[in-house]
Amino acid sequence: MRVELDTLTLKLEQLVNPIKECWHRGLCCSPSLVCPPLVCHSGRGPQTSQLITLAVDNSQLQTKRGDLERLVQDTWAHRGVLEQEKEALGCQVSELQSELFQLNSSMKQDLAVLRQKLASSEQRMAIMESERSIQAARLVALETEREQLLSQKAMLLRKLWRTRSPPELDTENVECPLRRTWYYPSP
């Protein structure tokens, strides 16, 4: 766009200064490189039709120059808007990074607490497991003792039946372990 503006400016300067050379930004340029040379007839200068054509070209160039200048202004304005949006996005990204860092720290703390709770639960579970095995061993011992007591009871009852119940023992409703029936003494 800048090159087109420079070219249009050169053409306008050539129209204003119809000399063999034009000066643009301190540089001497040949008008034949940019604009077609003006044709002079009989030394009187350019013809009227050429002047009209040049005026129309000048008007078109001025319009194009105005359009290009507006385009440049719009582009600069759009660039400014884009830079503001970029800054806003940068702020949002910074805020999100800060929130993410805080969330990460919070999650690390929560994880540490959960790990401690897990370790404590595992210790309690190990203690409960050992207590369960102790209780199971006690239960087996008690069951064995119960079996021994039942066998002793059965043996004592057999002895009692052989000797016909002594008077101090109450034999009513005594269970006989051999028959698993209730023994009721006859009257």
Image: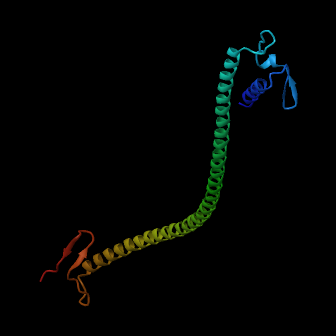
Total labels drawn? 0
Locate the C terminus and report the quarter of the image it occupies. Answer: bottom left
Please, is residue 44 above or below residue 178 in the view? Answer: above
Image quadrant assignment for residue 57: top right
List x then y, in percent, for residue 73.
66, 40
Please tell me which residue lies in front, 141 or 163. Answer: 141
Please tell me which residue lies in front, 137 or 113. Answer: 113
- What colour scheme has been applied to the protein in the rendered image? rainbow
Q: Is residue 79 left or right of residue 175?
A: right
Please, is residue 32 above or below residue 187 in the view? Answer: above
Image quadrant assignment for residue 119: bottom right
In the image, what residue occupies the spot 68% across and 23% down? 55
Please, is residue 180 above or below residue 35 in the view? Answer: below
Please tell me which residue lies in front, 59 or 100. Answer: 59
List x then y, in percent, for residue 128.
51, 69
Please, is residue 121 above or below residue 78 in the view? Answer: below
Q: Is residue 133 left or right of residue 89?
A: left
In the image, what residue occupies the spot 66% across and 33% down? 66
In the image, what residue occupies the spot 23% across and 69% down? 180
Locate the N terminus and report the quarter of the image it occupies. Answer: top right
List x then y, in percent, for residue 136.
46, 68
List x then y, in percent, for residue 166.
25, 87
| Extreme residue in the bottom direction | 168
| Extreme residue in the left direction | 187
Image quadrant assignment for residue 117: bottom right
Q: Is residue 28 left or right of residue 48?
A: right
